[in-house]
Amino acid sequence: MRKLIMLVLAFGMAVTMSKAQNNPLDNPFFSEYQTPFKVPPFHIIKLEHYVPAFEKGIEEQRKEIEAIINNPSAPTFENTILALDKSGRLLSKVSIVFYSLNSAETSDEMQKIARLVAPKVTEHRDNINLNEKLFQRIKTIYNNRDKLGLDSLQKRTVEKYYDDFVRNGANLNVADKAKLRHINQQLSQLGLKFGENLLAETNKNFYLVVDKPEDLEGLPQDVINAAAITAKQFGQEGKWVFTLQKPSMIPFLQYARNRELREKLYMGYLMRGNNNNEFDNKAIILEIANLRAQRAKLLGYNTYADYVISNNMAKTPQAVYNFLNEVWEPALKTAERERDAMQVMIDRKGGDFKLAPWDWWFYAEKVRKEKFDLDESELKPYFKLENVRDGMFYVATQLYGITFTKRTDLPVYHPEVEVFEVKDQNENHVGLLYLDYHPRPGKRVGAWCGRFRQQTYENGKRITPIVNIVTNFTRPTAAAPALLTWDEVETLFHEFGHALHGLFTDGPYDRIAGSVPRDMVELPSQIMEHWSSQPQVLKVYARHYQTGEVIPDALIEKLQKSQTFNQGFATVEYIAASILDLDWHSFTEPRRVDVVEFENESMKRINLIPEIYPRYRSTYFNHIVGGYAAGYYVYLWAEVLDADAFNAFIETGDIFNKEVAERFRKHILSDGGNNDGMAQYLKFRGKSPSIEPLLKNRGLK
């Protein structure tokens, strides 16, 4: 059941019969995968296989639920909770592949399938969550859970399922259940449309063509080479093309001397989903916010933010606002100082203009060079993608004793994808890690970690996970391999932390295994970023791609001194987006507002300076349309935890301290879902975290 909730929440299902249904034996989803480690056979999965597999998966789980509710025996953990926990295997099997690929390697045809299947998967999910007979069996066990001799994991599994059903409307009357079903259907379709619009606006509808060499002034040669390759892909051979993908856009904003073109590219990014065309997302984001407000009211909450955060560590929206405001004040003051320093530079160089948002990256880079004698182009030659990858593997080996072996005999969904087998120190198989690095037209923006199979137990035996990391990093060129920016280095380490969480999760019950509060889920990822900048780690992976020279101590020192540089900007743009998210989900009833004006008023209330926009504006805020609704704040909340957790290693004088690593692995990565988030953290750390390390790490104190 957890797999259904986690994999298809925000998605849905539906559809027509396809020709593959006439030959069920040809559908790879209908039998055990005949591949090493039983990985998905991407090489034989075809588009026509998905719909029949979704349909059959729904039907199979429907029968499994019928068997539970029609069982004449009194409800028990085994015949109700465990049976529910293990139901829906086929639906999970097809969902996890389809939705992973719809994010990483989509097409018009896949998007059509997603729209087709959305209504029926949503209906199926509601049929389970709103099944009165099933809920009564769960409720009976829940009410008697202290008398049934359940162990702690069984008891927590019962409590989580009971809470799931209540939070999804099981206690509503018939009329309100019908309203909830209708809202859920609408939300599933709107979420898909929002994502499709954003993909088109980012990858298809805007790109900057440069046809004059003088307009490339200031750009490093590797950036120019990459733009020439992109131009060929866009049918603009002999020119240079810059897209809204960050590996293309950010270097242009950092280095291009042509201010007018910087503005054009930046505004293309800023206006995604807000161009009053067929891909406009303004009406969609407003409708989503209103529907969520209605959904929260039906379920007994004042706002959707109350609904979401009540299940997190923070518990209330006010606690989140208070937390964000505590960091906002010093961050805004720091950002204002950063702005003023850049304006001084502009004035000193005879610039007759005020700093604008499209200038920030350009002048920040110049200030960094002046203040720390460091710019990005000095660092990138030391960050060859493959070396950074091996560096993060090295950290995991030092901490946990695991090893990574490249496998070239396993199916992949795209030729660029790499696969690594993960083993423990006793050579036992831990799982598989898929890595997919570079932008493509069918890949959504950003970076994320998912899975093609989550760990589970069958007949008492642990089935190992298959985890995937997807990023949009700079591609190699004919002149150089893929060289990462420092931000990309940290991103890869970050997503690898999520991957380790997925690989190490261990628990017999799917509902609670690896299931941590949303505002704790970034702890495993963000703590990994700390190791990326440690000198002894840098000296392992940071080697010049041409000479093999290890990064010099002087450059490491510059990097570390500059770690707090521009953190006012980074913190302000992030908190601004977090508050915008909370404001959208603070409706007590549906409202008719102008989306742009609503956003402007939200930012005006917190005195956001005009030189900075929120990291995500409403029309391309994909996080909050998906799983981070009323929860974008969680990255900063988790940073309090990760800063404190890394200090546990620092305090021992050994960043690879095996005892601390084992505690972190057990209580956070492996057993994190076994208890409430803070209870698990206290088992690891032995004390509550403090906000002080966060402020210090960001240079805000």
Image (cartoon, helix red, strand yellow):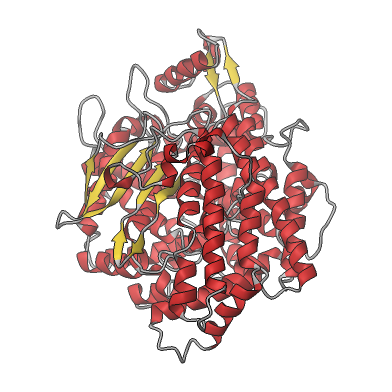
The residue shown at (38%, 36%) is 374
The residue shown at (62%, 22%) is 261
Can residue 611 be seen here? The reply is no
Q: Position of residue 587 (x, y in %)?
A: 77, 62
The residue shown at (56%, 67%) is 66
Tell me: 514 left or right of 71. left
Front-most of 122 and 190?
122
Picture quarter containing residue 236? top right
Q: How many numbered marks are there?
A: 0
Q: Position of residue 116 (x, y in %)?
A: 64, 41
For the view shown, which residue lies furthest in the top direction? 238
For the view shown, which residue lies furthest in the left direction? 426
Can residue 25 be seen here? The reply is yes
For the view shown, which residue lies furthest in the right direction? 592
Q: Position of residue 486 (x, y in %)?
A: 39, 40
Tell me: 254 left or right of 221. right
Front-most of 289 and 247?
289
Vertical relation: 590 (above or below) 672: above
The residue shown at (38%, 44%) is 492
Q: Position of residue 175 (x, y in %)?
A: 80, 68
Picture quarter containing residue 526? bottom left
Tell me: 658 left or right of 558. left
Vertical relation: 244 (above or below) 172: above
Tell me: 82 left or right of 175. left
